[in-house]
Amino acid sequence: MLFRILPCFIALFFLFLPTLQAGGKKPPPARIGFHFEGHRTDGNKLVIGREIYGQTRYFQIAPYFSLKDVAAFRSFPADKNQGYGLIFQLKKSSHIRLRSITTDKRGSWMLCLVNGRLCDAVMIDRGVTDGTLVIWKNATLADIRSLDWALPRIGESPERWKQRRKELKKSLKKKS
């Protein structure tokens, strides 16, 4: 009897495992990661190799900035049919970190992942003092929709953002 019930309990455990691991929380609607260039000698647990403009470069696995550091965003059409670009305005608490890391890492590369996908890599040519990070290409409309749910647009009031989220929710319900 126990041998018949035990597989059912095991199956139920693995069925609900993702919910248990997340603590019942919904995953974030969008993910953003800004990864700075590391060194090949750091090892495969700390850096990952990516081909950027024909050269293999190694980037830190842990993002230096993520969605929690971003206050607002804006999208724009990229050049040469390369999707969309994104401008991220960082929160005040992240401005100082951005200024210091971009000053220290001048001459190295920064990689941006949006929703787990490589969007763009940029060379840091000077310290960024205005608190904005720009991704010039390869964002999709799906990325922009997920960011619309997670973040306000640059210059948008909190009331307008709440209203826009309600409209997005209604449009999703109509589609399903």
Image (cartoon, rainbow, N blue to C red):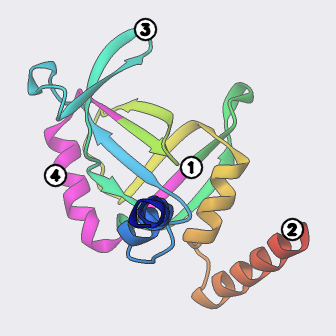
Q: Which of marks 3 and 4 is nearer the N terminus?
A: 3
Snapshot quadrant of residue 173: bottom right
Indicate the position of residue 66 as horizontal and vertical percent values: 36, 57
Query: Nearer the viewer's eye, disc 1 or disc 3?
Result: 3
Closer to the camera in the image, 136 or 14: 14
Q: Residue at x 10, y 27 (%)?
A: 42
Q: Name the residue under label 3.
A: 54
Residue 86's label in the rendered image is 1
Label 4 crowd (10 A; few <14 / some 14-19 / many >=20)? few
Say what amino acid the circle numbered 2 marks: Ser
- From which residue to which does the magenta span run? 87-110
Q: Which of marks 1 and 4 is nearer the N terminus?
A: 1
Tag 1–tag 4 contact (CB < 8 Å): no
Task: Work out how far the residue at label 4 is from the one at label 2, CA to CA, in angstroms.
Answer: 46 Å
Snapshot quadrant of residue 38: top left
Residue 107 magenta:
yes
Q: Name the residue under label 4.
A: 100
Q: Earlier in the sequence, mark 1 or mark 3?
A: 3
Say what amino acid the circle numbered 3 marks: Gly
Which type of secondary structure does the marked residue at label 2 adopt? Answer: loop
Which type of secondary structure does the marked residue at label 1 adopt? Answer: strand
Q: Which of marks 2 and 3 is nearer the N terminus?
A: 3
Tag 3–tag 4 contact (CB < 8 Å): no
Tag 1–tag 3 contact (CB < 8 Å): no
Q: Residue at x 41, y 63 (%)?
A: 6
Tag 1–tag 2 contact (CB < 8 Å): no
